[in-house]
Image: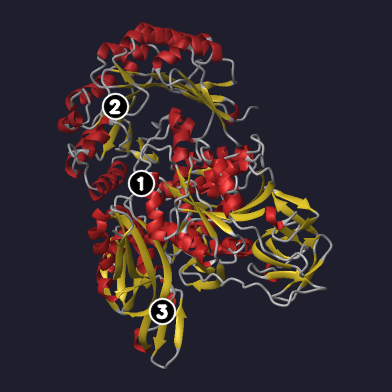
Amino acid sequence: MSQELIRNFSIIAHIDHGKSTLADRLIESTGTLSKREMEEQVLDQLDLERERGITIKAQAVRISYEAKDGKTYMLNLIDTPGHVDFTYEVSRALAACEGALLVVDASQGIEAQTLANVYLALEHDLEIIPVINKIDLPSADPEKVKKEIEEVIGIDASEAVFTSAKTGFGIEEVLEEIVKKVPPPQGDEKKPLKALVFDSKFDAYKGVVLYIRVVDGQIRKGMSIKMMATGKVFEVTEVGVFKPDLVNVDVLEVGQVGFFAAAIKNVKDARVGDTVTDSRNPASAPLPGYRKATPMVYCGLYPVENSDYDNLRDALEKLQLNDASLVFEPETSLALGFGFRCGFLGLLHMDVIKERLEREYGLTLITTAPNVIYQVFLTDGNVEMIDNPALFPDPTVIDHVEEPYVRATIIAPKEYVGQVMELSQEKRGEYENMTYVDENRVMIHYSLPLSEIIYDYFDRLKSATRGYASLDYELHGYRPSSLVKVDILLNGEPVDALSAIVHRESAQRRGRLLVEKLRGLIPRQMFEIPVQAAIGNKVIARETVRAMRKDVLAKCYGGDISRKRKLLEKQKEGKKRMKQVGSVELPQEAFMAILKMD
Amino acid sequence: MRKQWEQIQGIYIHIPFCMQKCLYCDFASFAGKSGLMHQYALALANEIRSRAGEMPISERATVFFGGGTPSLLPIDDLKMIINALKETGLWRAPAEVTMEMNPGTVDFDKLCQYQEMGIDRVSFGVQSLNDKELKTIGRLHAASEALQAIEQASKAGFERISADLIYGLPTQTLATFKDTLAAIVASAISHLSVYGLTVEEETPLATLLANGSLVLPSEEEAEMMYDHTISYLEERGLHRYEISNFARTGQESLHNLVYWHYLPYYGFGSAACSYDGKRRMTNAEDIESYIRGAAPTIEQLPSRTSLAEFMFLGLRTSEGIDLSVAKDRFGVDVMAMFGQEIEKYINKEMLSFDQAANNLKLTKLGMKFGNEIFELFL
């Protein structure tokens, strides 16, 4: 097929602005899938994605479309996640495209996360087609949104397409715009194979399946290929396209998007971002790759049953095959035993991984509170990167500590500017600037410690603005901070997994809140449990979990037996997620208490 | 010869009528429906006749009229039900026939009639002997009426008289509770059930507590009431034979022991529950549906569940469990299956195991924290 008839594009949208529905309509209206095969959010294949209505993994689909000019085009849609945690996935997908649909909700307008993704697309020189969706809603104001797109993003929106993915309105026009505006790929079919790996997944039968965009040349079954970063050579066993299920074809030609498998057993041999070439006739230079995703948030994952340790490691390894941004290494906690310190792109990513481990691998886990990675400068001149509060060095050997800052973009209705600033100030933010998005909404930039974002910034921002604010952020380097480690002692014994690193000024308050919170969370046991917060040797707060007095004397006759049993079952279930720490049983919530205190 | 657990050992008859619903009550009992009594009794007699052959029954199977307030049932209706039991051979030589009643619903004549009909044990819902407390929880009788009723039952010839008490009531103090306990022990009762007040959701009591109209005694105070109950009753010769039941020697409730020994029983009437060794069957809860003949709900009990129930019921008794019975009934070696956990609680002095007798039981401390241990076997 001529490259002239190929269009590679992705969709950029804020959560809930209708990206998945639009993708569904495009697939459906072109007959790529029959009505019978269609289901909602067809590209979101993880159960979690469907339940939460979000996209986590990038997905691809090939659509065949007969345009008004009478020609049949091959459209490759690469679906991308919208959440800030998965910006990395987005940039990979965008690198494989020439264009992007920018989907904006006609009544909500542009949100902070959309902006970040549009800028990414512009960096990749993508043609942007504005699509204003949900115009069927009574509150829709497409003309205003059009203006917003022009003023805030600075692209021409005069030809923006108005759609309602829900009703199907405007879908045809979107397809025509893609054909007209997205440039066809510009590769050279005569040059040696050069293909960009934009994703991969592990299949028990096929080995690693690589998702590629062919930039030059072609790839076919039986061909011997070389991974340019690793130099490893493999024989291609299968080539295919996404419909959106994997369907084998003989060859992927220049400009096309598809997959191949080559009996690659080790995912490390098939890195995302690598360039695939012909081993017998290799390209001279690889394509520009991607930056490796850097984890921003760390936490400890521990099996409730110590015997599940090996299962947890296996499960993490398997998930890592499909998610290179997940990092983990073994760690030992005095309180929790053997587990792993894991690094994630953000809190949603952490949540998703934890939930997948529990659901797909049947594990019951204890998660410690997430934290950022600190740079600790020691008096002897060494620098330590600390990703676990328990390992924070003794204050006497610390010269100073630096913590990661982000540049946060907040978009909110103008009447909430005061609240946003007050909150950001309280969270140690530094004001940068503010601009108007339209006459009602402003965009504010703040420099904020990442740890505050993890702590409760977003929740509080939402409640301060009645849910109207959106937030996006990017890492913006390290800055010195006055930080201290707060330890928690139960029964006089420090529990390493409960330690937290906090700003010196709020240490007292957080310590007090934390022990109060823990007192409420730790179930009463047969003995009294003192709960203390301490900085070094100095106790800054203390509470007591009173001893459990007794069971209530209760009837248990013929008719009560089932009910009694069910109560006992519930009681037992409640204890499942408890971890024995010394003589005290701690529930999962106790380890998260530091995050949920206000 | 048939094993004990292969035969019905007890018959429960549910009489769901009450004059007034107590504030804490969430049992299947109804006030203001006395017009249905005769129809209900007919339906009961019917159920007895149609189900009598379901399972072999011990000649000595106990009978228990519970409620609600069984003593509200007219004598003729009661006779009809007893006749149905006799005709069908369910009532031959019962080891015990109990009737629950509320003070204020019986007089000397009625008690004599019960006696003549073969009822040999009465159980009074006394709850407290403090008028203020009784009023607070919506009981209709006064303390003096309760003591009178016990006295008359004794005069009518009943030797087996039981009373129910509740501790931890709103407005109750350790002192008033001690008075109640002393007065009841001084009466003619030979058996006592003592329960801690459980606030069930959606009862008027729950509402009154939630909005602050009523206040419960502190946990510390309730614990003192509990401790006092255990030591005082023991002192007075009422030994604790089950977690919340106390009796003079030989006066234990044989019917309730059927439940705690996990033996089969019939339950007739609305909301009544039957157990045949494999299944539990519960009749429709509301009176009208029951009269209309609504189908019961059936719960199959897998052997693992049965074992768990056998364990947590048996451990409620002071004598504990003969583990060879568990082996015999379920083919399971309990010590092999739960040994590690059991060991843990033996070390905590909450369980004790007598190897020679193959007997496992709760210690006094274990009885105080029973739920913690019962959970093990689920």
The chain letter for the residue carrying disc 1 is: A
Q: Quadrant of the N terminus of chain B?
A: top right
Helix, strand or loop at mark 2: strand
Q: Are marks 1 and 2 on the same chain?
A: no
Residue that label 3 marks: A392
Verify CB contact (< 8 Å) between mark 1 and mark 2: no
Q: Indicate the position of residue A490 as horizontal and vertical percent values.
A: 35, 67
The chain letter for the residue carrying disc 2 is: B
> In the rendered view, would you say B193 is above or below B295?
below
Horizontal placement of B290 versus A458: left or right?
right
Q: Indicate the position of residue A193 as horizontal and vertical percent values.
A: 75, 68
Residue that label 1 marks: A551
Q: Indicate the position of residue A537 as horizontal and vertical percent values.
A: 30, 79
Kind of residue sitting beneath label 2: Gly
Helix, strand or loop at mark 1: loop
Residue that appears at 65% across and 72% down = A287
Kind of residue sitting beneath label 1: Asp
Q: State the CA–CA distance, disc 2 to disc 3.
A: 64 Å
Residue that label 2 marks: B125
Q: State the CA–CA distance, disc 1 to disc 2.
A: 22 Å
Verify CB contact (< 8 Å) between mark 1 and mark 3: no
**Looking at this rendering, what residue extends furthest in the front direction?**
A69
Helix, strand or loop at mark 3: loop
